[in-house]
């Protein structure tokens, strides 16, 4: 059984704190934070219906109850527990995603609920609610929270849709925007936790980071998985192997025929040999061998057969004879008196 990062017993601390409340207020807090046998946290509306009161009245009772707890003798006696939580929060980066923090304390949902209540009632702790850019997070330093969020926003603005970065590079980019932040926080684990605050920056199943609105991160189908497979492979790969790697790396069923069809349809991929696909971003030109020969000659001017073969072989995985045969077609290519080939007029 894993060791808890806190030395106190959350359920006992919460029980002592709630003892200062009237019965109904204690019941409502218990339902609201999932502190009883039922671990589900009830909404204001659900609690209101249970007691026949409005959701706003439930909110008022909740706020009243938290205020009573904070002013109680029991609260003063639990300073050590709150100090432990504060120290733990600092050790994890000072600004932490709520679910990550609770999961770090315990995998037990009931214990997580009790820690969540202690965060909610504890005076040093401030919650920043989820919005379009960030997840629910807790902090004890408003200035630090703002600096981290500003750094993450700058980091996101600097990403293109195609950016796909190793974790070390993404951490390095974030650090560039955090010059004014204390050195105590500048380590790999805390940087990764801070990256996790953002809803606009994320990583794919291969551990590569980028913008979450990119298909490289939010993969939606065989084409996106195939792109990541070929990119990871680093060189042309047969579509059968692409399908096999999709299943191995992403645990997604990929039929060979379906994978081949998807590769054919997507301009990100270039057929460079019999069943071999490369990425267009690597510089491979689309088209049949004849088209590639034409593009090579138009780019470089008249070339000898050997020069054409050498340059085309960098673009296509084909036999030399296939290139030579295509060059002999007078409809598309002509040979001058120096034995060099040009594109036919």
Image (cartoon, rainbow, N blue to C red):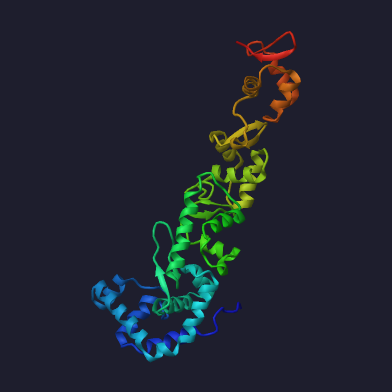
Query: Residue at coordinates 44% horizontally, 90% vertically from top-left?
Result: 77
Q: Which of 250 and 205 is in front in this view?
A: 205
Q: Taking the image as drawn, is residue 322 in sight?
A: no
Q: Nearer the viewer, residue 343 or 245?
A: 343
Please state the horizontal and vertical placement of residue 309, each as a whole percent of the image: 73, 23
Please state the horizontal and vertical placement of residue 239, each as a whole percent of the image: 64, 39
Q: Quadrant of residue 44?
A: bottom left
Please state the horizontal and vertical placement of residue 34, each as a whole percent of the image: 40, 77
Relative height, residue 109 to residue 242 (above, below): below
Q: Give left or right: position of 60 versus 227.
A: left
Q: Which residue lies furthest to the top in this view?
A: 337
Query: Residue at coordinates 62% horizontally, 24% vertically from top-left?
Result: 288
Relative height, residue 241 to residue 270 (above, below): below
Q: In which quarter of the image is residue 54?
A: bottom left
Q: Which residue lies furthest to the front in this view?
A: 180
Q: Quadrant of residue 150?
A: bottom left
Please state the horizontal and vertical placement of residue 206, each as a whole percent of the image: 60, 53
Query: Residue at coordinates 65% horizontally, 40% vertically from top-left?
Result: 240
Q: Quadrant of the N terminus?
A: bottom right
């Amino acid at each position: 059984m894993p060791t808890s990062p806190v030395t106190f017993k959350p359920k006992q601390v919460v029980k002592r704190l709630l003892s200062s409340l009237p019965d109904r207020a204690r019941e409502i807090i218990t339902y609201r934070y999932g502190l009883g046998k039922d671990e589900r946290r009830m909404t204001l509306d659900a609690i209101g219906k249970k007691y026949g009161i409005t959701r706003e009245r439930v909110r008022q009772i909740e706020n009243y109850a938290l205020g009573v707890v904070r002013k109680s003798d029991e609260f003063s006696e639990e300073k050590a527990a709150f100090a432990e939580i504060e120290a733990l929060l600092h050790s994890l980066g000072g600004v932490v995603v709520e679910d990550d923090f609770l999961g770090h304390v315990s995998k037990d949902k009931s214990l997580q609920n009790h820690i969540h209540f202690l965060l909610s009632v504890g005076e040093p702790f401030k919650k920043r609610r989820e919005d379009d850019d960030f997840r629910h997070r807790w902090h004890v330093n408003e200035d630090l929270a703002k600096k981290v969020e500003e750094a993450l926003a700058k980091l996101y603005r600097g990403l293109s849709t195609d950016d796909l970065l190793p974790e070390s590079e993404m951490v390095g980019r974030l650090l560039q925007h955090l010059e004014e932040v204390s050195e105590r926080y500048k380590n790999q684990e805390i940087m990764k936790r801070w990256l996790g605050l953002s809803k606009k920056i994320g990583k794919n199943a291969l551990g590569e980071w980028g913008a979450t609105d990119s298909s490289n991160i939010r993969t939606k189908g065989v084409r996106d998985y195939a792109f990541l497979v070929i990119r990871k492979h680093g060189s042309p790969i047969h579509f059968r192997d692409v399908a096999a790697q999709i299943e191995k790396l992403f645990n997604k069923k990929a039929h060979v025929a379906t994978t081949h069809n998807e590769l054919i349809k997507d301009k990100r991929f270039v057929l460079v040999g019999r069943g071999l696909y490369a990425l267009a971003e690597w510089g491979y030109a689309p088209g049949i061998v004849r088209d590639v020969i034409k593009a090579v000659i138009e780019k470089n001017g008249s070339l000898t057969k050997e020069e054409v073969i050498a340059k085309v072989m960098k673009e296509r995985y084909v036999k030399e004879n296939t290139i030579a045969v295509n060059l002999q077609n007078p409809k598309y290519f002509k040979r001058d008196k120096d034995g060099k080939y040009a594109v036919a007029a």
